[in-house]
Amino acid sequence: MAEPNAGWTGSAGELALVVQEIADGITVQDLSGQICYANLAAAQSMGFPSVEALIGTPQAELLARFEVLDASGRPLSADELPVRRAVRGDPSPESLIRFRVRSTGEERWSLVRPKVVRAADGSPRFVVSAFRDVTTLRATEQRLTLLADAGEILTRSADYQETLNELANLVVRELADWCVVDVIEEGSGVQRVAVAHRDPEKLAEAQEVQRRWPSRPGADDATGRVLRTGEPLLIPLITDEQIREAATDPEHAEYLFRLGLRSVVIEPLNARGRVLGVLTLVRSDADRAFNEAELPLLRELAVRAATSVDTARLLHETTEAVRARDDFLAVASHDMRTPLAAILGYLQLALRRLRPADPASDVKLNEYLRAAERMTERLTHLVTELMDVSLLQSGQPLAIDRQPVDLGDLASRMVEVHGRLSAAHTFTCDGDSRVVAYADVGRLERVLDNLLSNAIKFSPNGGEIRVTVTSTGTHGRLSVTDAGLGIPAADLPGIFERFRRGSNVGPVTGTGLGLAGSREVMQQMGGDIEVESVEGEGSTFTVVIPLAEAPAPLP
């Protein structure tokens, strides 16, 4: 069995050279904390040009160069550093430490692993620390976390002013000292919809600046240029002279100085080829100036914010369009009922006044008038159904007029009407006798009419359509059964949703609104509609309606 390191023949000097070239930083500190050995990676990660420069720096001076923080951002005292904890014998697992260079604001992250080297008697002699630079990995993790948080915020509500305010607060926690969002509102120009600042007192001053010196799309200031061009702007370091030039007057400049504008990025909110606004981020510390490397993250934030604004506006426009459509349908349905009622009245009057002077002619005329009467009644029902749909879509309750209705008589009348309309189908009506429900007769007729029309439409090869009336004791049940296309099992759960149709209907026309509207009407009458169906074998739709005067809950 080979001895450990049996293949190693190098000298101590060669071993030292290997340690110097290791990618991870390695230091050796005495018990006072002074660094007495380091490799090149350690020196470079601490900002020193050589190992000698690092070792020659007194401990107090070295500590003064950095602000040391834990993973959460809490500053660490000298006694809380991993090396000191290891010397004291405290548990010293691997620690994630942040080093912020005070002179530049640069921040680095390291995984530090201290190990106490002890003498033969067990007393500590020195501490060896190995630390791996994970700055790039940590930056990627923070970027992904920030984008995930921003995405969650921006999809939380359709009110983009609310979500943009939350986004601005997230940004000042993670990236900037001050964040504002300006949006171009149609008819009112640029509006500042979100302002956030680390300092609550300065937040009030920022809002005062916007109130007295608002941004304008055509202005020649930085915000105006980004609004006009749609191109981002980075000013790594803002000088006092630039602030004075940007200010409208001395008082404006005084406010800007107090707010601490030292580094700024202005990102346009671009969506579908339009500039919707701008996202402005400001840092007050010149040592933490924005740089080119941060722009991709800020640009991604702006893209997501712009998408949120654009989506919210599209949703609002769509909602308004739907509301206008529903208002139109309600008005049109109401206005159409009057002339239809007049036409129906004249047809019925003409039928009553027919003279038997020319029997052959009168029979034909009677047939025409009867057909016109039926079609007018059907059109009147459709207009009323359209009016119901518009009310249901707008969330308004229907004016239900409940009356006793014999379900058997209703079924017989509707079967007779549809039997005359479709010669390809055989209609039968059976079931219990004298089942009296309590319902809005006109609407119940329209529901049954819709179910029978569907049975005809979705059994294009003809066949039997059966209407069955039964009673459970508390509810009447009106079932319409056909032997047509049936409904695929995967489509059954959503068949009563608006605009949903079976995936197998092919060229059979329809809107996907009839079943949804019929079920909502029945539910407002205290009932429901149920369905059983097997693809290729047909369907059974059952209307359930209360029998008692006060509708009882469904069993």
Image (tube, rainbow, N blue to C red):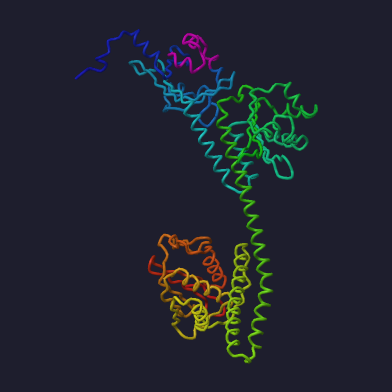
- Quarter of the image for the N terminus: give it: top left
**Rendered residue at 52%/11% (across/down):** 57
Q: Is residue 543 left or right of residue 267?
A: left
Q: Residue furthest bottom?
A: 357
**Rendered residue at 53%/67% (across/down):** 514
In the rendered image, the vertical position of residue 519 relative to residue 213, given as above or below: below
The span picked out in magenta is 38-62
Q: Is residue 258 left or right of residue 507?
A: right
In the rendered image, the vertical position of residue 424 relative to residue 115, given as above or below: below
| Quadrant position of residue 259 | top right
Q: Residue furthest left?
A: 1
- Where's residue 314, x and y in %? 62, 48
In the rendered image, the vertical position of residue 5 relative to residue 458, given as above or below: above
The answer to whether residue 355 is magenta is no
> Between 76 and 240, which is closer to the camera in this rendering?
240
All told, the count of numbered labels is 0
- Where's residue 287, x and y in %? 61, 22
- Where's residue 339, x and y in %? 68, 74
The answer to whether residue 59 is magenta is yes
> Between 458 and 139, which is closer to the camera in this rendering?
458
- Where's residue 455, x and y in %? 46, 71
> Between 185 and 537, which is closer to the camera in this rendering?
537
Taken as a whole, is the magenta stretch helix, strand or loop?
helix
Q: Is residue 286 left or right of residue 494?
A: right
In the rendered image, the vertical position of residue 37 relative to residue 389, given as above or below: above
